[in-house]
Amino acid sequence: MQEDESDSGIKNTWFDPIDPQASISQKEVCDLHFQLFASLRDKQRTSLSEFVSFSYLASLDLFINATMQEDYENCINMNAAKKPNEWVTKFVSTNPIFLMWDNDSKLEVAGTTSEAITNKCANTQACAETGACQACNACSIGIAQVYSSFEADLNKKFAATFKAYSEDMFNQLHEANLALETTAV
């Protein structure tokens, strides 16, 4: 469907909808939000902005966890163990979930993840030949470390964004109150 130019002005430009996934059911999303809103209400946090912020973060977390699980299910352990640097660099560079992640962070995480796989899966060639060593799950090591770093980066960015919006909203309300006080005098 082609988007009409006139329709684009009515969209919430700040809202980044999360793509639906077959592995996330509607019931799961509804249950998550019911528990979230009940928890916020129990903590006497009832502002709409907090509900929106926490809802977005909870939905994003659900989406990231589902995507991480699918990536793990599709990972071929031998590829990750034999050439960890190539595997993880390709993983972070081509996976669409990481498009919003800056390239420097991706490559930094690829390096540390490759090193972690290499250290934890030492002697994979000798292991494969003799079968006399513990199994190494390079996919779980790599995917867990990449997603953990990605989530930490996202959380830091979201916290900064929400803080900036809150401060801006407070400043605008403060200025409006000051303007009302000066006109009332």
Image: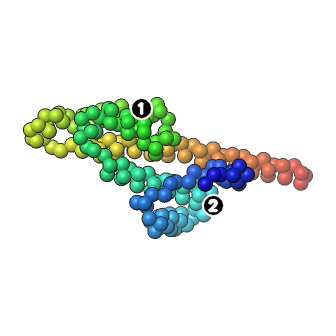
Q: Position of residue 145 (x, y in %)?
A: 35, 42
Dot 1: within a 10 Å radius of its alpha carbon, few (fewer than 14), some, or many (20 or more) residues?
some
**Foreground: 183 or 101?**
101
Q: Residue at x 21, y 43 (%)?
A: 136
Taking the view exactly as shown, the residue that stands out farthest to the front is: 1
Relative to 32, residue 77 above or below:
above
Pointer 2 residue: 48
Q: Earlier in the sequence, mark 2 or mark 1?
A: 2
Relative to 9, residue 45 above or below:
below
Amino acid found under the numbered disc labelled 1: Leu
Q: Residue at x 14, y 38 (%)?
A: 127
Give the left or right position of residue 102, taking residue 70 as reference. right
**Foreground: 25 or 43?**
25
Amino acid found under the numbered disc labelled 2: Leu
- Disc 2 or disc 1, which is closer to the eye? 1
Relative to 166, residue 112 above or below:
above
Q: Is residue 16 visible?
A: yes
Residue 107 got which mark? 1
Give the left or right position of residue 41, taking residue 90 as reference. right
Give the left or right position of residue 83, taking residue 132 as reference. right
Where disc 2 sits, the SS reads helix
Where disc 1 sits, the SS reads helix
